[in-house]
Amino acid sequence: MSQASARHLLVDTEEQCLALKAQIEAGEDFATVAKDHSNCPSKMQGGDLGTFGRGQMVPEFDEVVFTAELNTVQGPVKTQFGYHLLEVTART
């Protein structure tokens, strides 16, 4: 079964998500941005979600995590929870 490790941040608006993505792409540390701005409890770990299998996350999240290039910020990805930036750190 496919497994992936990823980190993410979650915000309420697409505009905020795009602004944070620009900060990360300009050199800000993903984990620091997640700690400062994410609405998800994972922010305490810099957005780290650990390792999980296909189907353990919502479908929109899964689609990105199991197809995106590694170590590249993806998003905004809209789910029922809000807007995410995702970074897949490993996949097996």
Image (spheres, rainbow, N blue to C red):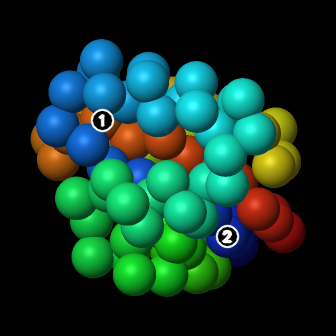
Q: For residue 53, which quarter of the picture?
A: bottom right
Q: For residue 78, which quarter of the picture?
A: top left
Q: Is residue 61 left or right of residue 14?
A: right
Give the residue at x 83% y 48%: 70
In the image, residue 78 sits, relative to residue 46, either above or below, namely: above
Q: For residue 5, which quarter of the picture?
A: bottom right
Disc 1: which residue = 83
In the image, residue 77 sits, relative to residue 31, either above or below, namely: above
- Please provide percent x and percent y for residue 86: 55, 46
- Please provide percent x and percent y for residue 87: 65, 50
Give the residue at x 62% y 79%: 51
Q: Is residue 83 left or right of residue 49?
A: left
Please identify the quadrant where the N terminus is shown: bottom right
- Please provide percent x and percent y for residue 66: 66, 48
Pair 1/2: label in front: 1
Give the residue at x 26% y 43%: 11
Instruction: State the residue in front, 76 or 64.
Output: 76
Instruction: State the residue in front, 65 or 87.
Output: 87
Give the residue at x 72% y 29%: 26
Disc 2: which residue = 5
Mark 1 residue element: strand
Mark 2 residue element: strand
Q: Residues within 10 Å of mark 1 (few under 14, many from 20)?
A: many
- Tell me which numbered mark, 1 or 2, is placed earlier along the sequence: 2
- Under mark 2, the amino acid is Ser
In the image, residue 54 sits, relative to residue 59, either above or below, namely: below
Q: Is residue 43 visible?
A: yes
Instruction: State the residue in front, 3 or 45.
Output: 45
